Amino acid sequence: MSYLIQRLSYGFLVLLGVVFLVFTLFSLVPDPARELAGQNESPEVIEAIRKKHRLDLPYFPRLGYFLNDLSPISYNSTIEGEASFIDLNSISELRLFEGEGQVLILKSPYLGRSFLSDRSVSAILADALPGTAVLALAAIIIAMLFGIALGVLTALNKDTWIDHLTMVLASLGMSGPSFFMAILIAWFGGTLIYDQVLIPIWPIVFVLLFFGLKKYWAGARQFSLMKENSFLIGLLSGLAVWFVLIALKVPGGIMYLRLPGTGLSATGSLYEVDVWEGKKLSLVNLILPAITLGIRPLAVIIQLTRSSLLEVMQEDYIRTAYAKGLSRQQVIWKHAIRNALNPVITAASGWFASMLAGAVFVEFVFGWKGIGFEVFQALEKNDLPVVMGAVLVIASTFVIINILVDLIYGWLDPRARVV
């Protein structure tokens, strides 16, 4: 119980620090009332807008009202025109105490109203959150499935061309900025190979040829290098022939294997509105942004799985399993991989939370309607309450997931509770 209280206390302090930081940063922004009112509006209209959004108050009173709005238990005024006014006819919250002009209520956190649409920020984020959650979940599933598979493959083929090539690709995935990868994948998957995929024939021919010759090199020492790297050498040889044919412009020498394209649009959201059918679900729009968002965690999971599996394979119980006569496949799948996935699960839990923040660029490039897309539009239009609410929601998600992971670790391993 003390461990739970300690984790919850740390989480509360982190959230409180985030609230103070976010509120202070947005308090430094120039007064948006004039921009909201327009250049030709009268001073009275501008002042009314400032009063409506509490922009006429000093820093600390505004901070106090902001914390009061966020608090589950808040003290509000029922007198219209006051800064803490609340319309009792429009709320369904539990009233703990009601006096003359004052009321104490139990409610969900109130994030304010949008400057532009005057909609509740909570309602705006509630509409956007499912899109981001679906995108993040799809991305982490892709990263886990392919990351673990490729990590195991590289570990079992250590120091081969498969290992080196996969680690190079993983390094590129780690270093690629989100906005650049989003633009590249949107162009490549949604435009370049939208109709059809052209694969040059010659690299395929040479790969098959070198694999066919592989058995003839098995007993020849001088062909040992060719035998071990038959795929890579065949691929490079085929590419070289292809480039030569292109350079020489040989008639009929440049042949392609024509495959169906992706058929995926470069932009699109989870739901699309059709003129005849109305609002409909479009899961195909999820593929490209989910791949883009999952590239970086995919690269991390590949590296973690590889290093963890290689470390586990050196343990004593693995050698004991081999000594008992278990096959290599049984040792790997029943003993090694299960114990090697602990750091992978840790990384996946952290990445899932970070995807909510990292989806801003991805959602903007693909036109995906989620929290990231709403934040971008709010920043562009200086709609500060929406931005503040989105930041607080993302920070809360981080804290909640980290607390849950800490509690799970404390339950699985009592040593983790010792601080």
Image (cartoon, rainbow, N blue to C red):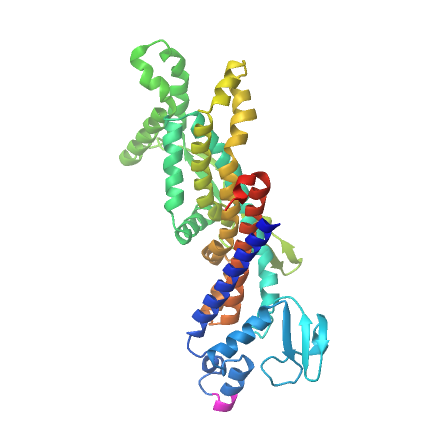
Q: Which residues are magenta?
A: 41-45
Is 295 placed above or below 383 here? above
**In the image, what residue occupies the spot 53% across and 80% down?**
54
Is 14 placed above or below 174 here? below
Displayed quadrant of residue 217: top left
Q: Which residue occupies the foreground of this view, 159 or 98?
A: 98
Displayed quadrant of residue 88: bottom right
Please give the count of numbered marks on the rendered protein.
Answer: 0
Where residue 312 sits in the image (x, y, percent)? 47, 28
Where residue 69 sits in the image (x, y, percent)? 59, 72
Where residue 316 sits in the image (x, y, percent)? 47, 22
Q: Which residue occupies the foreground of this view, 113 or 91?
A: 91
Q: Which residue occupies the foreground of this view, 338 or 116?
A: 338
Left or right, 238 with respect to 386, comes to left
Q: Which residue reaches farthest top?
A: 219
Residue 333 inside the magenta-drawn segment = no
**In the image, what residue occupies the spot 56% across and 25% down?**
334
Magenta region, main secondary structure: helix
Where residue 235 sits in the image (x, y, percent)? 36, 28
Q: Is residue 272 visible?
A: yes
Q: Is residue 115 visible?
A: no
